[in-house]
Amino acid sequence: MKIGFIGAGQMAQGLAKGLIMAGLTPAEKILSSCPRVDVMLLEKMRKLGCRTTSNNEHVANDARVLILAVKPPIVPKVLKEIHQFITPQHLVISVAMGITTRHIEQSLPPKSRVIRVMPNTPALVREGASVFSCGSATLEEDAATAHRIFSSVGTCDQIEEYLLDAVTGLSGSGPAYMFMAIEALADGGVKMGIRRELALKLAAQTLLGAAKMVLETGKHPGSLKDDVCSPAGTSIQAVHLLEKHGFRCALISAVEAGTQRSKETGGLF
Ligand SMILES: NC(=O)c1ccc[n+]([C@@H]2O[C@H](COP(=O)([O-])OP(=O)(O)OC[C@H]3O[C@@H](n4cnc5c(N)ncnc54)[C@H](OP(=O)(O)O)[C@@H]3O)[C@@H](O)[C@H]2O)c1
């Protein structure tokens, strides 16, 4: 399957790497564009073995699966450029935050096949969490294609589009919340005398391990928390303090704020 990336930034590179490593597409079948052909970003794509161009039209003509991996404000400009080259054979997949399938469909020929995806940064290390929605004219096989592509860089689920802003607030922006949690846990360790490098390693591995336990045991996180809180022990003391400082409330509010911002961003275009 030939895949075209419009954009050659972090997300395009991460996806291209995942596709190649998963054996889904050989590197030479991937073409990536960005306006300045001499930039480092395209050089990184070339290092993966992908073809590159400064011309978005070339990408639309070369591949039948197009991934729009540009920042949201650039999407309208790109859609104008590729409009006349989009055929019923194309599947257009956008990863741009907040931009609806309806908006993309309206900027392309009637009945264009469009899918909107919200991936997240851990896709760059093939531990992403992607969620997608189909537009109004997609074929049955299109969902399977999107699923195959984004499963190469982590988990992939389908959802109703009205929930994609909430997904943005949860898993799209979630890595930022968790990076803050890791940093803060490490700071706590350093405050208590652990050297920085080890504190960071312990903090990151603790989040990784806890996440794995939730996913692999299928147990409710509350139950897993109960399991580590022995009567009058250290964990329950610390849990009490977290509750006092509104830890859970802060995370719930963070997802709410991220969702709201994603909705606002979509409304800007
Ligand atoms: N990174 C993430 O974790 C993440 C997560 C979820 C969703 N997303 C979405 O993924 C999209 C890409 O994000 P990113 O982090 O990969 O951004 P990025 O690193 O800034 O990359 C954007 C790419 O688009 C290129 N570009 C700019 N104008 C263009 C044009 N007219 N035609 C073709 N390419 C053009 C840029 O090239 P120049 O540098 O030369 O301008 C760059 O290669 C965004 O819409 C973002 O919302 C990203």
Image (cartoon, helix red, strand yellow):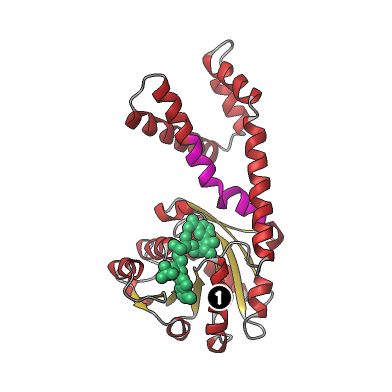
Query: Can you say whether 126 is above or below 203 in the image?
Result: below
Q: Which stretch appears magenta?
A: 164-181
| Crowdedness near tag 1: few (<14), some (14–19) or many (≥20) residues, C-alpha within 10 Å | many
Query: Can you say whether 190 is above or below 175 in the image?
Result: above
Q: Residue at x 40, y 52 (%)?
A: 125
Query: Can you say whether 174 is above or below 231 in the image?
Result: below
Quarter holding the C terminus?
Answer: bottom right
From the viewer's perspective, tell me whether residue 268 is left or right of residue 194: right
Q: Residue at x 50, y 34 (%)?
A: 210
Q: Label 1 CB, ligand 1: below 8 Å?
A: no
Front residue (pair 40, 118)? 40
Quarter-of-image position of residue 134: bottom right
Quarter holding the N terminus?
Answer: bottom left
Q: Residue 191 appears at what percent x and percent y?
A: 42, 22
Q: Residue 156 appears at what percent x and percent y?
A: 54, 57
Residue type (three-letter) at the residue carrying disc 1: Val
From the viewer's perspective, tell me whether residue 159 is left or right of residue 55: right
Query: Does the segment drawn in magenta span residue 105?
Result: no
Front residue (pair 98, 89)? 98
Residue picked out by circle 1: 92
Query: Does the segment drawn in magenta span residue 180?
Result: yes
> Main structural element of the magenta stretch: helix, strand or loop?
helix
Q: Residue furthest right?
A: 162
